[in-house]
Structures are given as structure tokens and as C-alpha cells.
Image (cartoon, helix red, strand yellow):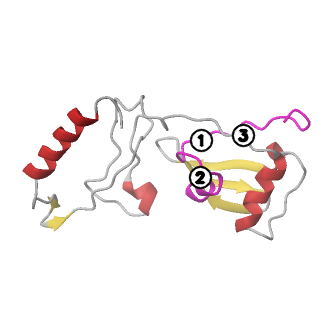
């Protein structure tokens, strides 16, 4: 437990107690109240995530999260690990060469620069699926392949 645990625990305890039994509604319906650890400065619009517009889940600026441990990160994968992870989900995946840069292309980004679709070899997958496969913090990612032999 951190040095400020007691202070923050007490604040949270009183907030939870003060709002017990309350719900947030939109047009008379209880909302889907969603949580994220960090949005990298801007939340995503619900239409990009769920495929349908939700009026109370629009993209907004989200400041003050820069100290979040997963605000940014770098991930490195060897070519072999890259292929192994993908083939766990797509066993029939065909790659054109042994160079990642020749096999991968971001096809589409959302308005907030998150990856919407990405082509790897002969398959096209969602940015969210790619994020899950590689354990990335977000779909706001960039790929910088290293030259073969420098890994």
C-alpha cells in the first residue's frame, strides 16, 4: 500500500457512501458507465469502439493522466515471437517475406489516431484484436520494425 493509501481510501469510502443507491441515466435509461486507466489524452468515440453512436460516450479531451503507469510503453518482439503470437489466432496466416515491414500495414486509424484496421500478411484484423494479441496498452500504437539481424 502506498504512502497516501489512508488519505485516498477515506476519500473514496465517503464518495461511495454518499452516492450509494444513485445511478446515472440518459433519457430515462441507466447508462453504461465505462472505465479506462488512460486514454492518452483523448477518449475514443463509442461509434469507433462499439460500432454504434452513444450520445453520452463521445470523444473528449482527458487531461492529467500522464502519470498513469500505462500511459505510454514500448514493446519489442522478435520476428519469431511476432509470427508465433499471430499464428496462435490465425494458423493459416501467410506472410510475404521474413521482414515485418513488408508484412504489416496500418490500413485505417480513427479520428483519435487509434488503429482501426491493420493488415498483416494476407489477413486484415481490427486494431483491438492486434492490441489483445500483443498485450498492448491501447489501440493507439505505431510500429517501427527493426532491420533483420539487429534484433
The residue tagged 3 is 76
| Mark 3 or mark 1, earlier in chain | 3
Q: Is residue 5 magenta?
A: no
The residue tagged 2 is 131
Q: How far separated are the C-alphas under marks 2 and 1? A: 9 Å
| Mark 2 or mark 1, earlier in chain | 2
Q: Is residue 66 above or below residue 52?
A: above
Q: Tell me whether circle 2 and circle 1 mark residues in contact (CB < 8 Å).
A: yes
- Helix or strand or loop: what does disc 1 sit on? loop
Q: Which mark is residue 91?
A: none
Q: Which mark is residue 141?
A: 1
- Helix or strand or loop: what does disc 3 sit on? loop
- Of residue 143 and residue 64, the one placed in the foreground of this image is 64
Residue 16 position, x and y percent, is: 15, 50
- Helix or strand or loop: what does disc 2 sit on? helix
Dominant secondary structure of the residues highlighted in magenta in the image: loop
Q: Is residue 150 magenta?
A: yes
Residue 143 position, x and y percent, is: 69, 40
Write the start and end of the magenta stretch as one range: 127-151
Q: Residues within 10 Å of mark 2 (few under 14, many from 20)?
A: some
Foreground label between 3 and 2: 3
Q: How far separated are the C-alphas under marks 3 and 2? A: 13 Å
| Quadrant of the rendering where the N terminus is positioned | top left
Residue 3 position, x and y percent, is: 32, 29
Whether residue 68 sits left or right of residue 86 in the image: it is: left
Q: How far separated are the C-alphas under marks 3 and 1? A: 13 Å
Amino acid at each position: 500500500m502506498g504512502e497516501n493509501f489512508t488519505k485516498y481510501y477515506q476519500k473514496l469510502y465517503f464518495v461511495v457512501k454518499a452516492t450509494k443507491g444513485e445511478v446515472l441515466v440518459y433519457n430515462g435509461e441507466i447508462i453504461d458507465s465505462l472505465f479506462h486507466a488512460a486514454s492518452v489524452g483523448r477518449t475514443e468515440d463509442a461509434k469507433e469502439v462499439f460500432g454504434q453512436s452513444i450520445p453520452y460516450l463521445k470523444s473528449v479531451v482527458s487531461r492529467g493522466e500522464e502519470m498513469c503507469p500505462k500511459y505510454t510503453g514500448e514493446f519489442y518482439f522478435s520476428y519469431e515471437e511476432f509470427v508465433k503470437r499471430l499464428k496462435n489466432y490465425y494458423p493459416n496466416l501467410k506472410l510475404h517475406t521474413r521482414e515485418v515491414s513488408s508484412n504489416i500495414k496500418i490500413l485505417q486509424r480513427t479520428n483519435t489516431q487509434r488503429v482501426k484496421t491493420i493488415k498483416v500478411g494476407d489477413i486484415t484484423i481490427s486494431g483491438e484484436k492486434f492490441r489483445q494479441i500483443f498485450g498492448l496498452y491501447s489501440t493507439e500504437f505505431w510500429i517501427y520494425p527493426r532491420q533483420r539481424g539487429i534484433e
